[in-house]
Image: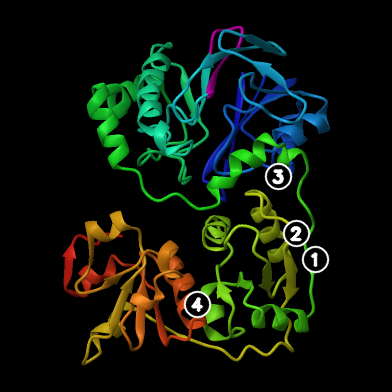
Amino acid sequence: MQIVPIALPQLGNRCHLLHDGSSALVVDPPRDHLVVEEAAARAGVEIAAVADTHVHNDYVSGAPLLARRHGADYLVSADERVAVPHEGIRGGDVVEVGSLRVDVLTAPGHTEHHQAFLVQDRAGAGALLSGGSLLHGTVGRTDLVAPDRTAGLARAQWATARRLAELPSGTLLLPTHGFGSFCAGGVAGADDSGTLAQERLANPALTLGLEEFVSRLLAGYGPVPTYYAHMARLNRAGAGASPGRAATPVTAEGVTDAVLAGHWVIDVRQRRDFAGGHLAGSVNVELGDQFATYVGWLVPWQDDIVLLADDPHHLDDAVRDLAAIGIEGVSTHVLDGSTLLPARHRRAGWEDLCDLERRPVLLDVRRHDEYDAGHVLDAHHVPLHELADRLGELPAGEIWVYCRSGFRAGIAASLLQRAGRSVVHVDDDLGRVADLQLPVQGSVAA
């Protein structure tokens, strides 16, 4: 058995392709079918089966499209209502993929009908495709289905983890979540793979009693990106059966009209370039691994979006990343050398704050847990995902906005400027405040 992990940093997840040298099983694929097909082509194998461990809450599954393109079975829990052709499977079922044996395991917790897959070859080597159940060093969160199900699913998650841990010690653990996705119920380990024997030593689901585990798990849940509320519905409707609607190019005049109409005009350039010149009223979410997450979190669902970039390839990437979370049909515009970009804001480092005679208004836009762990003394706090609704709480005057590394602060600076505030973007590593001996409360290690 050969295992090909497919990193999906834009989603904070992993997809896995497992094969015997000829036939392959794909588990939890993204909507972008090309990344999976390229991996299969490099391995020289045919995709024979495609499976979802659960109906996902953080992205649109590409399983229906991938299965159709390759004439493969789409495997998903028989208890889920999925409006696309599929093969319903239940715990106890066995699926053959070439010479690989796939045992279907019931694994509720992350979702009610979650399943895991134990894949073995004829030599007995095994890999557990655990989806959002047992992760490296943690488990998947259980509060994404319904508020009144959270505690019950947490108990089910504990029981599931215990059952999965009874598999042979050398079984490889291959989860989908735990690499940056907000679906993880805690801080996951840094390793991409490990064995069940290693999990038994450190995973809280396997070292804590039931009630202590549930209490700690529920207490550790952070905010949920708003677009998550729409993902399960889209997946049950089979949205991933198509690659998504194409973007619509718009003219410079169309961009101006969008700004005047109050639509979301999002500049995907790097934050330093945006600060040096941009269209007034535009918002900066620089293209990178967290681009889609924060666009989906900040922009109300189905609001009109216009994307701006100075490279058409960057627009293609942005459109693809948004389609991965169900945002389709956006408009795009390429900024060329003739485009006037009159708006600017200042970028600064922490040493610039030291040079000021009078402390400005400081705004920390990290999450609540990050701020509570430590922050610059006297900094105001509004998490980025709450900023648009809480602008009126901020004091008058110029605002210096910071986060951990500068990415979220860049978004916040553009939101503040869009609202008419004078802003300075502290585009610096928060860990440097200790080196500069700036007063802090708690620990602000980067």
Sequence order check, earlier mark of 4 and 2:
2
Q: Nearer the viewer, mark 1 or mark 3?
A: 1
User: Residue 102 appears at what percent x and percent y?
Assistant: 61, 13
Secondary structure of the residue carrying tag 3 is loop
Sequence order check, earlier mark of 4 and 3:
3
Sequence order check, earlier mark of 1 and 3:
3
Gap between marks 1 and 3 measured at Cα: 19 Å
Residues at badges 1 and 4 in contact (C-beta under 8 Å)?
no
| Residue that label 3 marks | 32
Q: Nearer the viewer, residue 327 or 426?
A: 327
| Residue that label 1 marks | 248
Q: Nearer the viewer, mark 4 or mark 3?
A: 4
User: Residue 83 appears at what percent x and percent y?
Assistant: 73, 31
User: Residue 129 appears at what percent x and percent y?
Assistant: 53, 24
Q: Residue at x 42, y 69 (%)?
A: 387
The residue type indicated by label 1 comes to Thr
